[in-house]
Amino acid sequence: MSQGDTNYIKEDPWRILRIMSDFVDAFESLAPLGKAVSIFGSARTSPKHPAYKKAHKIGTLLTKAGFAVITGGGPGIMEAGNRGAHEAGGRSVGLNIMLPFEQKTNPYVNFPVPFRYFFARKTCFVKYSTAFVFMPGGFGTLDELSELLTLVQTKRVPLIPLIFFDSKFWGGFMQWIKDSVLAEGYISADDMNLFHITDDPKEVVQIILDHLRKTDTPFMPNKWLG
């Protein structure tokens, strides 16, 4: 065994402690948050882009409906959602990830929670969210939506609103799921009911409120970790 291999093995116990630190710090910070909705979308979206303006509106409406707004804390769509919540006087949460290239927390986050590890951060999105809104985005957004669809499909988390915003952007993806994934039998017809598609910020909030009324249960952090 080389010296490099030995050093790597010695580092593992400290890595475990750093992972634990991510979870412990985040759980303590987010436990009092109450009902919240996560908004996902591209960090590359300009403030002049229609999607930014829609995300800003959604953040505002969610705040007025009594929800905290959670994003990844960065620029683009994340900034828009946080901005809408912040300017409406609400709880604007940023689960920011430390990256090799600098990602600054956007100035509209009033409840920052930093993370070293992506998987710890994703766990906290799921654990503390009542619903999820997927705005137009790239690989990160696709990663988050596919994981959420899997967790709901496999009943690792309860059936919660998964809302795809912008039918033009998501339309091709949904058609592919129907024509290829469903047609080949890789998912069941019922799985097509796991999500909603809308172009209306007001409908985003209404879908969530209707779901909460239908389930008639107070919000509790998801206990899917077992």
Image (cartoon, helix red, strand yellow):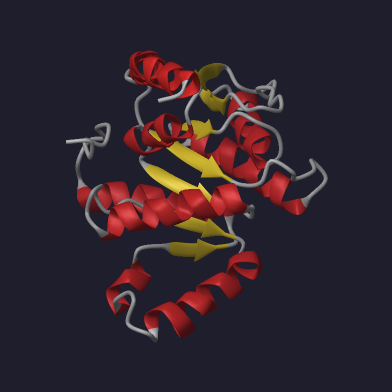
Where residue 186 appears, as percent x and y from the top left, is 34, 76
Q: Residue at the right extreme? A: 48
Where residue 183 appears, as percent x and y from the top left, is 39, 86
Q: Does residue 26 sit above or below 143 in this rendering?
A: above
- Whether residue 207 is visible: no
**Residue found at x 58% / y 58%:** 200
What is the tally of numbered marks visible in this picture?
0
The answer to which image quadrant residue 198 occupies is bottom right
Is residue 127 left or right of 178 when viewed as pictured? left
On-image quarter of the C terminus: top left
On-image quarter of the N terminus: top left
Is residue 75 left or right of 162 when viewed as pictured? right
Q: Does residue 179 sit above or below 33 in this rendering?
A: below
The answer to which image quadrant residue 150 occupies is bottom left
The answer to which image quadrant residue 12 occupies is top left
Where residue 32 appears, as percent x and y from the top left, is 33, 17
Nearest the eye: 158 or 114: 114
**Residue found at x 27% / y 54%:** 159
Q: Residue at the left extreme? A: 226
Where residue 217 appears, as percent x and y from the top left, is 19, 41
**Residue found at x 64% / y 52%:** 137
Is residue 219 left or right of 89 when viewed as pictured? left
Is residue 143 left or right of 11 when viewed as pictured? right
- Whether residue 139 is visible: yes
Q: Does residue 132 sit above or below 96 in this rendering?
A: below
Q: Residue at the front extreme? A: 1
**Residue found at x 47% / y 53%:** 145
